[in-house]
Structure formats: structure tokens, C-alpha cells
Amino acid sequence: MFEHQMKWRSKKAGLPPGSYVFLGEKRQEEIQLNLMTYNETDFEFRNIEKIEDAVDYKEKTDVTWVNIYGLHDIDLLKKIETAFTIHPLVLEDVLNTTQRPKIEIYDDYVFAVIKMIYYDAEEAEISTEQISIILQNNFIICFQERKGDIFHALRERIKNSVGRIRKNQADYLAYAIMDVIVDNYFSVLEKLSDHIEMLDEEVSDNPEPEMAQKINMLKRTLLMLRKNTWPLREMIHQIARDENPQFRKSTIPFLRDLYDHTVQVIDTTENYWEMASGLKDMYMSMVSNRMNEVMKVLTIIATIFIPLSFIAGVYGMNFDTGASPFNMPELSFTFGYPLFWLLCIAIGGGLLFLFKRKNWL
């Protein structure tokens, strides 16, 4: 991933600031646009062919939400720059999918970048999608890398006029979009919790060598999650703290509540990081204990065979000096061979009994 980011960044080498260059993975062949507009009594949702179809809604008092799926159409962004008077550096950041979560406040609009998190339970991996939001009066433009997201429930709430969303303005919709993204973080954390419990059982029952790779992958996943949640907290805190004409006072309490949610996500992520580190330590301890058990068994076997090897070595010299007083009489003894084995068995059994007595076995 890091190599891809460096390769993408190299595309902009030598270009002036504000140059439109798409940096990222092309996830959708064709750009798709849809438009939603509503007030307390009326609602409209439709797909549109070009951004010019949404410009007429700019001057209306109704809340308008335009979703753009796909980020590689440079001509489309140039039209948005002209139609909505957006700074080219903002649209340059929209095209750069390696952005960290942030917010930029301009005189007549707010630009925010958030990372949507997806978790693949089968691969135990996290993937991210950059969501860029421009809030301008009662108009929201939302840029996504691909179609298919977690905003379906939010659209249904708007369509069916559930809750207070139809009674509020576009700043509340911007809050609702961020709230859905943060709530999805909790869903990802819940799945990670299940994965951590599964790894804990596997480490306890059967610490195989591949467990180290699984734990390292879990730590990388948590690191990516932490990398995206810390700046998100600061971003939401900045909106709730600073005076901003794009966000009404009535929306600030909801943003503060959203800030608390991001703090909970960060705290939970930190707890999971500590649990993952504990799993790594437990795995290393289990492997060390298993190695110690193996070494203990090998040491006991070696200890038992040391005296037996000594005896076998002495009687394997085969010195026969005849009638000399220095001969080895056992060499000619009738029952010498079975007595040798009885002696070996007695020594081995005695050592085993001693080890058992001292609780070394």
C-alpha cells in the first residue's frame, strides 16, 4: 500500500499547486451521479447525467445532496469548480485518495475528508474509501470512490421523514453523513472483537507458527483504524469548537455528541491494540513454554543415557588380559550380558523415579 501511495504521489512531481491529477485506485469505470432534494414536506431523488442538472438547485432553499461515484473525471471537477466557485486546491484534495481525515473552512463553504472503513471478515483485513464532502449553504456535494456505501439507511430516513432530519438544514445532513460513517466504525470494531476472541482461543489451544502472522495482520489493521480515527476526532472537534456560519448553533450539540463517539472509537481501538499486543506476548510465551517442554524431555533422555553410555563404553573396550589381575572378569561371565541390561534398566528406572519424585516430570 505504501509503495502504491509513493507511486501515485510521483504523478504530481513538478506540477503546480491545484493541478487535477487523480491519485488512487480506479474503482469504477463510469462516473455516476444522483441527486436528492427535500424539505419538510417534499422529497425528490433521481439519477442525473451531468453536474449541470444540479446547478439549478443551488439557489433553492431546499436541502440538496449530490452524490458523485468515481473520482477520475477531471472535466467533471473543472465544471464543479466553475459552477460552485470551489478552490482548485480543494478539488485537488478530492482527487488525492491518500488524504488523511481533515476539515477546511472557507468563507462560503466547508470541505471535509473522511475515511469510510470496510472490514472483510474472511480475509481479516480493513479497506478504506475516501469520502469528500463540500457543504455550501443548503447544498452538499459528496464524492465517493465507488458506488455502494452505508448511506442507504440514511436515505431511507430522509425519504420516509423519520426523525428530525427533514426539519433541519444541510449542516444537519452533513452531521448525519459523518455520524453514519462513525457508527460504521463501531460495526467494524465489533467484528474485530470477534476476531480477537477467536485468535485468543487459537493461541491458547494451539499456538501454531502461522498465528504470529495473524496477530501481526491484526495489529496492522488496528494501526490503520487508529490512523484514520485520530484526525477524525480533531476534525469534528474543530467544527464543534469554532464558530462557522455553515453550521448552525442547533447542530453543534449533535457534533459534540459525534465527537464523544469518535473518542469511544479511539479508546476501543487502543484497548484492542493492547489486547493484540497481549496476544503476541501470550503466543511467544506459549511457544517458549512448548520449547521448554521439548528441551526438558530431551534433557531427561540425555541424562538417562549418560550413565548408560558410560557403562556401555567401559564394557565396549573388550580388554582381555588373561590371568592378569587387571582383566575384566565380567567379559567371560556367563550371565554378563543380561546383567548388563538389568543394570542399564535399573539405572534408567531409578533416574526416572528420581525425576518424578522431584516433580521434574
Image (cartoon, helix red, strand yellow):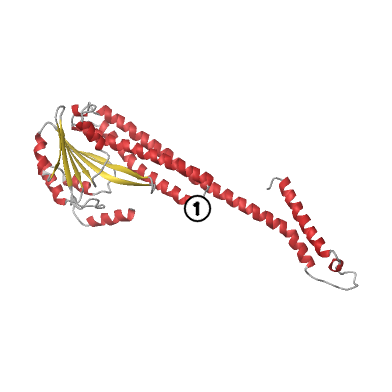
Q: Up-down: is 153 above or below 76?
A: above
Q: Up-down: is 297 above or below 240?
A: below
The quadrant where residue 134 appears: top left
Q: Mark 1 points at which residue?
A: 209
Q: Up-down: is 256 above or below 303?
A: above
Label 1 environment density (alpha carbons within 10 Å; few <14, some 14–19, many ≥20): few
Front-most of 193 and 86? 193
Q: Is residue 151 left or right of residue 277?
A: left
Residue occupying the point 52% across, 49% down: 207
Q: Up-down: is 159 above or below 100?
A: above
Q: Is mark 1 on a helix, strand or loop?
A: loop
Q: In this view, does 246 lie to the left or right of 351?
A: left
Task: Look at label 1 and name its amino acid.
Answer: Pro
x and y percent of residue 293 in the render? 62, 50
The quadrant where residue 14 appears: bottom left
x and y percent of residue 346 in the render? 78, 55
Front-most of 99 and 355? 355
Residue occupying the point 66% across, 55% down: 299
x and y percent of residue 263 in the render? 35, 34
The answer to whether residue 233 is seen in the rendering is: no
The answer to whether residue 272 is seen in the rendering is: yes
Q: In this view, does 121 lie to the left or right of 65?
A: right
